[in-house]
């Protein structure tokens, strides 16, 4: 285990058994913005999560001693720290399992540093303690959560209760992937877990109302086989 | 098993003899007994040709017994009144055995020839497969090494000459290494997909999907690579739910768009058309490139097949065979044709009825 203490930025815990990847993340992320701590196994990662109290965890799924999914579950028993999974496993099942276990995001290796930094900042932003913003705004989309008023480019659009609930749920988790299972459970209830077409129809209708070109969505993007993500464009 | 075959042979020879006897009985009023021997000889020849040497000799033996019993006076006994018939018996038996041997030999030779030619065919197929595997291996190692050469070269140049290089040269080297790493990653991903498809491990998870979402996913995955390329979408109006695996079919469309983007001139637009034709969904990706020589239209879906193009476009020859594998796993078909106005159109047909009802 190694700790970098030359800076006092946000604390990042890297749990990965590949020394080369830890080294690359170390060079890429060590800056004034971040303070890095490294762990090379699931168990040392868990104890580091408790001792180092990171602001964000970057976790590999294929650890030698403990499955990454299990690491996520154990951390989630006591902490809501954002976890971004970095894995070579690119199958949708693996992504869904990690996200359903409580991971915040998922990046398939190999990835670019630019993308990693963007995802890290989004996760950190979300986790920063902030009073719920009454107005969500991204690009031409504006949602006033108090008045339940949705406007696109200034023009008000009418949403059905389900469409509005779905949009509100995605806003509450802006920039984060919500799996089909998570969305279905929270909006339609457990009974609809196996009815993905209900979600597809609602997404399609919602896109028609809030997207300029529904076949090239800018706000609500599809993560094929995994779920949906509401992208927040910073203005 | 071979015992049964042998017994069967001898039973048939008995039947042949019985048949010959019946014929001789019919013609008995018109023939002297010695000429009936010819009918029995026919039975021996037939046995030799169809059953082999031993059943033929048995046929000759049974024929002598039957001829003696039924036709040599005194009839219906094995005793012989005129001793001349003993010469007939002996002559018949010797001729029968010789015919059996000769005919059987010819038969064995022809069987041997057949076996040899089958073996030669097998060896030829094996050789062809070995050649194909060697070609695949060569192709794979070439495709894996080529990007590695650029990556290693660029990185070592930066490591060893870094200070002496201009900022532009450094940026070029880094960009090369990055692009080639990306290409290598895509190739490895394709290889994995293909081997999963071939092993039958990539089973489509068929769900009702929004057609517009499918095209949207492919377009957003291609966004960076397409750049300023004009892409025209022609989709049915309104929500169209189709039963397919969104992840796999997105990949099919991405591969087709990527091909169109690579092989067609930059100013030519790409057209994506989706139509419902009866019980089928038709998806077409058409470009305005040079098309493909007619003779190659079928082969472009084969593994590692690459159409010879003047400039290097860096394909792996796997994209279309992956498309074919995925489409066929959906119970559909994929075909390419040259457009009369120029360019290539690849059309996918997927059965709509996959057991999922519309909500």
Image (spheres, coloured by chain):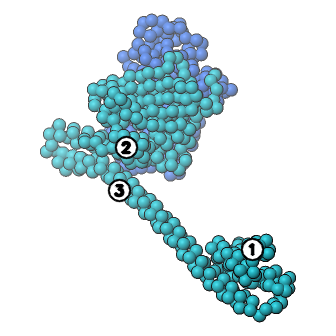
Chain colours: A blue, B cyan
Tell me the CA gap for discs 2 and 1.
61 Å
Up/down of A83 relative to B40, above or below: above
Quadrant in which the C terminus of chain B is drawn? top right
Quadrant in which the N terminus of chain B is drawn? bottom right
Mark 3 surroundings within 10 Å by alpha-carbon count, few (fewer than 14), some (14 through 19), many (20 or more) = few
Horizontal arrangement in the rendering, residue A186 relative to residue B175 (left or right): right
Rendering coords of residue B52 (x, y %): 64, 76
Same subunit under labels 3 and 2?
yes
Quadrant location of residue B230? top left
Q: Residue at x 64, y 32 (%)?
A: B355
Mark 2 surroundings within 10 Å by alpha-carbon count, few (fewer than 14), some (14 through 19), many (20 or more) = few
Q: Can you identify the residue that label 3 sits on?
A: B138
Quadrant location of residue B51? bottom right
Q: Can you identify the residue that label 1 sits on?
A: B20
Q: Residue at x 63, y 73 (%)?
A: B49
Quadrant location of residue B76? bottom right
Q: Nearer the viewer, mark 3 or mark 1?
A: 1
- Compare marks 3 and 2 and give the one earlier in the sequence: 3
Rendering coords of residue B162 (x, y %): 18, 45
Q: Nearer the viewer, residue A221 or A2?
A: A221
Mark 3, secondary structure of its residue: helix
Q: Nearer the viewer, residue A115 or B86?
A: B86
Mark 1, secondary structure of its residue: helix
Up/down of B57 relative to A25, above or below: below
Question: What is the chain identity of the residue bearing mark 2?
Answer: B
Question: What is the chain identity of the residue bearing mark 3?
Answer: B
Asked whether residue B23 is in view, the answer is yes
Q: Residue at x 39, y 15 (%)?
A: A139
Rendering coords of residue A140 (x, y %): 41, 13
């Amino acid at each position: 285990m190694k700790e970098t203490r030359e800076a006092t930025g946000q604390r990042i815990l890297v749990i990965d058994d590949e020394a080369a990847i830890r080294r690359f993340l170390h060079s890429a992320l060590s800056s004034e913005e971040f303070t890095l701590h490294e762990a090379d196994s699931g168990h040392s990662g868990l104890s580091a999560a408790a001792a180092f109290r990171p602001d964000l965890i970057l976790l590999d799924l294929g650890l030698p001693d403990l499955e990454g999914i299990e690491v996520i579950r154990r951390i989630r028993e006591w902490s809501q720290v954002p976890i971004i999974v970095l894995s070579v496993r690119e199958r949708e099942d693996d992504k869904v399992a990690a996200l359903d276990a409580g991971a915040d995001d998922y990046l398939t290796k190999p990835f670019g540093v630019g993308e990693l930094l963007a995802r890290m900042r989004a996760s950190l932003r979300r986790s920063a303690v902030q009073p719920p913003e009454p107005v969500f705004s991204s690009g031409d989309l504006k949602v006033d959560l108090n008045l339940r008023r949705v406007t696109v480019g200034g023009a008000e659009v009418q949403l059905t209760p389900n469409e509005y609930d779905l949009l509100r749920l995605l806003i509450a988790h802006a920039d984060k992937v919500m799996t089909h299972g998570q969305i279905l459970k929270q909006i339609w209830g457990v009974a609809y877990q196996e009815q993905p077409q209900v979600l597809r129809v609602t997404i399609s209708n919602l896109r028609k109302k809030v997207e300029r070109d529904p076949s090239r969505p800018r706000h609500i993007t599809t993560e094929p086989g995994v779920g949906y993500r509401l992208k927040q464009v910073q203005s | 098993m071979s015992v049964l075959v042998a017994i069967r042979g001898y039973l048939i020879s008995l039947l042949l003899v019985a048949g010959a006897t019946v014929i001789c009985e019919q013609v008995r009023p018109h023939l002297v007994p010695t000429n009936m021997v010819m009918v029995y000889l026919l039975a021996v020849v037939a046995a030799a040709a169809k059953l082999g040497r031993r059943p033929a000799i048995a046929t000759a033996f049974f024929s002598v017994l039957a001829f003696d019993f039924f036709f040599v006076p005194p009839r219906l006994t094995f005793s012989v009144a005129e001793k001349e018939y003993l010469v007939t018996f002996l002559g018949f038996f010797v001729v029968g055995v010789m015919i059996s041997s000769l005919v059987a030999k010819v038969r064995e030779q022809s069987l041997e020839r057949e076996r040899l030619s089958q073996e030669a065919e097998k060896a030829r197929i094996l050789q062809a497969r070995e050649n194909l595997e060697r070609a695949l291996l060569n192709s794979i190692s070439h495709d894996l090494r080529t990007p590695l050469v650029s990556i290693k070269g660029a990185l070592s140049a930066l490591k060893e000459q870094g200070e002496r290089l201009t900022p532009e040269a450094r940026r070029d080297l880094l960009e090369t290494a990055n692009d080639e790493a990306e290409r290598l990653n895509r190739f490895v991903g394709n290889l994995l997909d293909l081997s999963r498809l071939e092993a039958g491990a990539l089973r489509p998870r068929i769900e009702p999907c929004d057609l517009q979402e499918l095209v949207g996913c492919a377009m957003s995955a291609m966004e960076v690579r397409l750049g300023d390329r004009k892409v025209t979408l022609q989709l049915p109006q309104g929500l169209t739910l189709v039963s397919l695996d969104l992840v796999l079919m997105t990949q099919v469309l991405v591969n087709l768009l990527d091909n169109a983007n690579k092989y067609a001139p930059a100013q030519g637009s790409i057209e994506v058309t989706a139509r419902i034709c009866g019980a089928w969904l038709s998806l077409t990706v058409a470009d305005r490139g040079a098309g493909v020589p007619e003779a190659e239209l079928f082969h472009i879906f084969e593994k590692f097949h690459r159409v010879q193009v003047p400039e290097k476009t860096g394909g792996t020859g796997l994209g279309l065979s992956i498309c074919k594998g995925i489409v066929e796993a959906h119970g559909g078909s994929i075909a390419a044709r040259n457009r009369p106005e120029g360019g290539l159109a690849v059309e996918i047909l997927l059965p709509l009825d996959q057991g999922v009802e519309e909500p």
